[in-house]
Image (cartoon, rainbow, N blue to C red):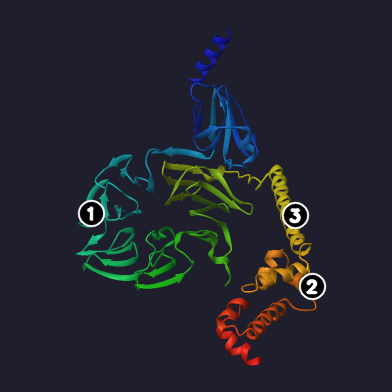
C-alpha cells in the first residue's frame, strides 16, 4: 500500500501547475511543505530540506543556516505546494519573453539583444550584437548597435559601420560607438561614446557639440526623448546633464553628479542614478548628497508616487525603510520602458513585463528580533573581551611587582651601552609614568646619564682611550669630544 501511495504522489507530481513563475522539485523527491525561518525560505521534501537562495537556485538546508542571517524574500511573491512541487507566483508579473536572450533595449516591434536584433519576434542576424537605443522617426527605425542601422517596415535599408571595428562611420569620419540618436528633419544628433555630434544629411557636414576626452570607458549616455520637445533636446553623458536648443544649436551643460551618470528619471522627482546610488537632484543643497539608496543600481522609474529601481539583483521598490526586493533577476542598464502602469525591463534572461498598479510592497524589517538579540549579545561579548584585555594590560603595566628600584638599577648597569627609557619600560612591563614613580626623585634619563658619566670619569682616571670610553659608556666619540670632555 505504501508503494502504491508513493507511486500516486509521483504521478500527481508530474502534472505541472499553470501560470507559475517558478516550479521546483528535488530530483525524484516530492515537496511536502515549506516554511519561513528568520526570513529564509525552506522547502521540506521527501529528499530532505532545501533553501531557496534566489530565483531557481536551491541548496540543501542544515540547522546551521539559521545562524547565518536573513535572506531577501521578494515582496511580490506567493508560494504554494501543488502536485508535489513548490510553486512560486508573482501577481504583478504579466509576461516573461525571450528568456534565453540578454535584452538590452526594447522598442515594441524591435528588441536589441546580445545575440542580434529581433523584429516582430523574429531574430535577424545581419546585426550580430546590439546594445544601444532604438528610435523611430517618420517611419524609419534607427538601431544603435555601436554602428547605426536603418530599417523601414522591418527591412534593412543601410548601415553606417566602421570598416575594422563596430563604430558609427559616416561621411568619411569614424565617430566612435553610437549609443543614441535623435532625428529632426534632415538633422541628426548622435550621442557617441564620449561626444555629441550634429550631422547635416543635406550638407553632409558634422559638428562636434560636446567632447569629453577623459570620459570613463564604461560610461554610456542617452537622450531623454520622452521629455524633450521640438525645440529642446535633453540628455546626459558622463557626469553631465545637457539641454540642446535645436533651433539655435546652443548647448547648456550642467554637472549634476560627482560620478558617471547611469540614468536620469524625470517624473515628480528628478532622480539621478550614478555609480554611488540614487538621489533627487531637485532636493540637494550645497553639501553632501542625500541618497535615497546607495548601491550598484542601473536606474529608476516612477509610478503613483512610488520609486522603482533595477539592478543586477532585480527589481526593487524604494521607501524610507530601504530598498525592498520585488523580483530577483539580472536587469540590464538602459533597458526600462514605462507606459502607463506597464513596465518592461530587459535582462540577461529576456524581457520581464510588470503591472505596477498591482504591487503592494510590505517592506520587511531590516532584521528580526532574534537577529537583533544575537547582534547585541555579540557586541556585548566583544566589549567585555576588550575590557578584560585592557585590564590585564593595565595590571601588567601598573602592578608589576618585579619592577623595583634595585632591579631597574641593576638592569641599567648591565645594559648601559644601549639602554633607553623605552627599553626599561618594555623589559619590566611598566608605563613611563610608573617608571618615574619608582625612581623618584631622580628621573630615569638623568639616572642613565649619571651612570655613563661615572664610567667616563673612571676611564679618564685610568688613561683609557676615547674609543674604549665610548664603547663602555654608550656615548658616541663625537658626543664625548664636543659635550662631555670639555666640562671635565
Q: Residue at x 61, y 45 (%)?
A: 361
Task: Pick whichever, 58 or 192, lies toward us.
Answer: 58
Viewer can see residue 107: no
How many C-alpha atoms fall within 10 Å of the one at disc 1: few (<14), some, or many (≥20)? some
In the image, residue 477 above or below residue 82? below
Residue 5 higher or lower than 201, as above or below: above
Return the residue nearer the eye: 320 or 47.
47
Residue drawn at x 77%, y 79% is 442
Q: Residue at the front extreme?
A: 462
Q: 454 or 56: nearer the eye? A: 454
Classify 10 Å Cα crowding around label 3: few (below 14), some (14-19), many (20 and above): few
Q: Would residue 380 be found to the left or right of residue 101 on screen?
A: right
Residue located beneath label 3 in the image: 388
Residue pushed farthest bottom? 486
Mark 1 or mark 3, earlier in chain = 1
Can residue 469 be seen? yes
Residue 159 shows which numbered tag? 1
> At numbered mark 2, what does the secondary structure look like: helix, strand or loop?
helix
Quarter of the rendering occupied by the N terminus:
top right
Q: Position of residue 86 (x, y in %)?
A: 55, 28
Q: What whole-number distance in Å separates the C-alpha atoms at marks 2 and 1?
A: 89 Å
Q: Residue at x 42, y 42 (%)?
A: 351
Q: Say which of marks 2 and 3 sits in front.
A: 2
Q: Earlier in the sequence, mark 2 or mark 3?
A: 3
| As drawn, 427 above or below 463 | above
Q: Which mark is residue 437?
A: 2
Relative to residue 176, is residue 41 drawn left or right? right
Mark 2 vs mark 3, CA separation in Å: 25 Å
Amino acid at each position: 500500500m505504501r508503494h502504491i501511495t508513493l507511486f500516486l504522489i509521483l504521478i500527481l507530481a508530474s502534472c505541472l501547475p499553470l501560470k507559475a513563475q517558478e516550479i521546483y522539485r528535488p530530483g525524484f523527491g516530492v515537496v511536502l511543505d515549506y516554511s519561513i525561518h528568520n526570513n529564509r525560505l525552506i522547502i521540506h521534501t521527501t529528499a530532505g530540506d532545501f533553501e531557496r537562495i534566489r530565483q531557481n537556485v536551491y541548496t540543501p538546508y542544515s540547522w546551521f543556516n539559521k545562524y547565518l542571517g536573513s535572506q531577501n524574500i521578494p515582496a511580490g511573491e506567493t508560494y504554494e505546494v501543488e502536485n508535489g512541487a513548490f510553486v512560486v507566483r508573482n501577481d504583478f508579473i504579466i509576461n516573461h519573453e525571450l528568456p534565453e536572450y540578454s535584452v538590452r533595449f526594447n522598442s515594441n516591434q524591435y528588441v536589441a539583444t546580445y545575440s542580434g536584433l529581433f523584429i516582430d519576434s523574429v531574430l535577424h542576424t545581419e546585426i550580430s550584437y546590439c546594445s544601444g537605443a532604438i528610435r523611430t522617426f517618420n517611419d524609419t527605425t534607427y538601431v544603435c548597435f555601436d554602428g547605426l542601422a536603418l530599417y523601414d517596415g522591418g527591412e534593412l535599408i543601410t548601415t553606417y559601420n566602421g570598416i575594422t571595428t563596430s563604430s558609427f562611420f559616416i561621411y568619411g569620419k569614424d565617430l566612435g560607438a553610437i549609443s543614441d540618436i535623435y532625428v529632426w528633419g534632415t538633422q541628426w544628433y548622435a550621442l557617441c561614446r564620449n561626444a555629441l555630434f550634429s550631422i547635416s544629411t543635406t550638407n553632409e557636414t558634422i559638428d562636434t557639440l560636446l567632447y569629453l576626452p577623459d570620459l570613463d570607458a564604461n560610461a554610456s549616455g542617452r537622450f531623454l526623448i520622452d521629455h524633450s520637445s521640438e525645440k529642446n533636446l535633453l540628455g546626459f553623458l558622463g557626469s553631465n546633464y545637457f539641454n540642446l536648443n535645436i533651433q539655435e544649436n546652443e548647448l547648456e551643460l550642467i554637472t549634476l553628479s560627482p560620478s558617471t551618470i547611469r540614468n536620469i528619471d524625470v517624473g515628480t522627482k528628478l532622480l539621478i542614478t550614478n555609480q554611488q546610488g540614487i538621489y533627487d537632484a531637485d532636493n540637494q543643497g550645497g553639501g553632501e548628497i542625500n541618497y535615497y539608496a546607495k548601491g550598484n543600481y542601473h536606474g529608476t522609474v516612477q509610478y503613483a508616487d512610488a520609486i522603482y529601481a533595477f539592478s543586477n539583483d532585480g527589481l526593487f521598490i524604494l521607501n524610507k525603510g530601504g530598498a525592498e526586493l520585488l523580483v530577483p533577476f539580472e536587469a540590464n542598464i538602459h533597458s526600462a520602458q514605462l507606459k502607463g502602469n506597464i513596465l518592461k525591463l530587459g535582462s540577461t534572461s529576456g524581457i520581464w513585463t510588470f503591472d505596477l498598479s498591482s504591487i503592494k510592497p510590505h517592506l520587511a524589517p531590516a532584521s528580526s528580533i532574534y537577529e537583533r538579540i544575537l547582534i547585541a549579545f555579540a557586541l556585548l561579548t566583544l566589549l567585555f573581551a576588550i575590557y578584560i584585555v585592557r585590564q590585564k594590560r593595565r595590571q601588567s603595566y601598573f602592578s608589576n611587582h618585579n619592577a623595583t628600584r634595585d632591579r631597574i638599577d641593576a638592569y641599567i648597569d648591565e645594559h648601559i651601552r644601549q639602554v633607553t627609557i623605552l627599553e626599561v619600560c618594555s623589559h619590566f612591563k611598566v608605563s613611563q609614568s610608573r617608571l618615574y614613580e619608582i625612581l623618584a626623585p631622580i628621573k630615569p634619563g638623568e639616572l642613565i646619564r649619571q651612570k655613563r658619566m661615572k664610567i667616563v670619569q673612571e676611564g679618564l682616571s685610568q688613561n683609557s682611550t676615547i674609543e674604549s670610553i665610548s664603547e663602555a659608556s654608550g656615548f658616541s666619540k663625537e658626543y664625548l669630544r664636543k659635550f662631555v670632555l670639555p666640562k671635565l
